[in-house]
Image: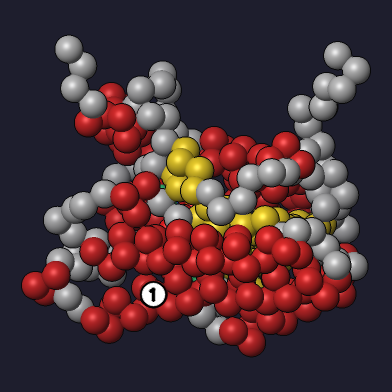
């Protein structure tokens, strides 16, 4: 097996930004990048205490926390500039910061102010991060990787959370346009779409603990076990690594086959 690749160090010496990196899927991805050899992992979030603690746990020279509200383009621009100043270049950005619907959000009772607030984070925030990261990659001549968090919610119809579903469809559309527009520079752009992971986002929204949420969803997976943030992080590492060097413009669903639940088994 002369050509076999090592299973770790998939992002050896790379510099990555993770937005929403202080919690849940972002936190698991920060740890996965560090475990896989990244020389710089920048945690961007608005939860300063958690973000600083996570960076400290990885080590001062390999990880840095930077306060960044993704709804503020100036903060996003400065996040990217600071990363390049600190580590010399930017190879990877995981545009992951996101929130769930504020309220029920059904069409007949749409609260459009809440809709705007959600879109400012889930769509505009992703667009701002993608824009400034891509500019830094182009300026630095880096054939980088951009991964955005969409959701399996983008392909379902529900009796609520309409704005959230719309926002994740928007992220997938943005990813597709960006992957085409940046392909000439060798920059790849992909999405991950997680199923339900028992992160603070989900637990707080449905008012349940981690174990309760996992128990609720366990019967619906085709695969044995429950979906964890680590499973999503592993897919992000794959998309950020050379293992996926000819993959761009794709939405990678990580849900243990939950989506197949609608299949009728005779
Ligand atoms: P989480 O709440 O644990 O993490 C989200 C992080 O984003 C938090 O640390 C939060 O502080 C940060 N954030 C929120 N607003 C921000 C802003 N304006 N600027 C910067 N950071 C901000 O939730 P999570 O489940 O890990 O969510 C991460 C992403 O995954 C989100 O985009 C979410 O929509 C998506 N997602 C989650 C699930 C799930 O089941 N947990 C499923 C599909 C998609």
Q: Residue at x 27, y 83 (%)?
A: 113
Please state the total of marks drawn on the protein image: 1
User: Could you tell me which quadrant the N terminus lies in?
Assistant: top right
How crowded is the residue under tag 1: few (<14 C-alpha within 10 Å), some, or many (20+)?
Answer: many
Residue 96, image quadrant: bottom right
Q: Position of residue 121 (x, y in %)?
A: 45, 73
Q: Position of residue 97 (x, y in %)?
A: 52, 63
Q: Is residue 108 above or below residue 61?
A: below
User: Is residue 224 found left or right of 33 in the rendered image?
Assistant: left
Say if residue 34 shows up in the picture: yes
**Circle 1 — which element?**
helix
User: Is residue 82 found left or right of 179 in the rendered image?
Assistant: right
Q: Residue at x 85, y 44 (%)?
A: 12
Q: Single out the residue that lies furthest toward the bottom.
A: 74
Q: Nearer the viewer, residue 56 or 36?
A: 36
* Type of colouring: secondary structure
Residue 143, image quadrant: bottom right
User: Is residue 64 found left or right of 202 in the rendered image?
Assistant: right
User: Could you tell me which quadrant the C terminus lies in?
Assistant: top left
Q: Single out the residue that lies furthest toward the left.
A: 108
Say if residue 64 shows up in the picture: no
User: Is residue 228 found left or right of 108 in the rendered image?
Assistant: right
Q: Which residue is under mark 1?
A: 119
Q: Nearer the viewer, residue 109 or 174?
A: 174
Q: Position of residue 252 (x, y in %)?
A: 50, 43
Q: Residue at x 47, y 38 (%)?
A: 254
Q: Position of residue 224 (x, y in %)?
A: 41, 19
Q: Is residue 254 above or below residue 95?
A: above
Q: Is mark 1 within 8 Å of ligand 1?
A: no
Q: Residue at x 34, y 27 (%)?
A: 221
Q: Is residue 165 above or below residue 38?
A: below
Q: Nearer the viewer, residue 13 or 166?
A: 166
């Amino acid at each position: 097996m002369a050509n076999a690749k090592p299973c770790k160090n998939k992002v050896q010496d790379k510099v990555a930004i993770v937005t929403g990196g202080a919690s849940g899927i972002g936190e698991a991805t920060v740890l996965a990048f560090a475990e896989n050899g990244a020389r710089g992992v920048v945690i961007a979030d608005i939860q300063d205490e958690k973000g600083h603690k996570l960076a400290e746990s990885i080590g001062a020279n390999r990880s840095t926390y930077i306060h960044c509200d993704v709804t503020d383009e100036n903060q996003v621009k400065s996040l990217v500039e600071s990363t390049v100043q600190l580590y010399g270049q930017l190879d990877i950005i995981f545009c992951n910061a996101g929130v769930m619907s504020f309220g029920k959000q059904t069409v007949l009772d749409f609260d459009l102010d809440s809709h705007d607030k959600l879109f400012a984070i889930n769509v505009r925030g992703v667009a701002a991060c993608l824009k400034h990261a891509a500019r830094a990659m182009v300026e630095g001549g880096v054939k980088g990787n951009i991964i955005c968090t969409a959701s399996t919610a983008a392909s379902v119809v529900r009796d609520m959370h309409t704005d959230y579903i719309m926002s994740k469809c928007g992220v997938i559309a943005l990813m597709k346009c960006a992957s085409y527009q940046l392909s000439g520079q060798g920059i790849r752009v992909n999405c991950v779409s997680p199923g339900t992971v028992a992160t603070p986002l989900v637990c707080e929204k449905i008012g349940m603990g981690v174990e309760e949420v996992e128990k609720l969803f366990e019967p619906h997976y085709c695969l044995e076990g429950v979906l964890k943030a680590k499973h999503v992080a592993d897919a992000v590492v794959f998309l950020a690594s050379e293992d996926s060097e000819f993959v761009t413009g794709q939405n990678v669903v990580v849900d243990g086959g939950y989506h197949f639940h609608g299949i009728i088994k005779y």
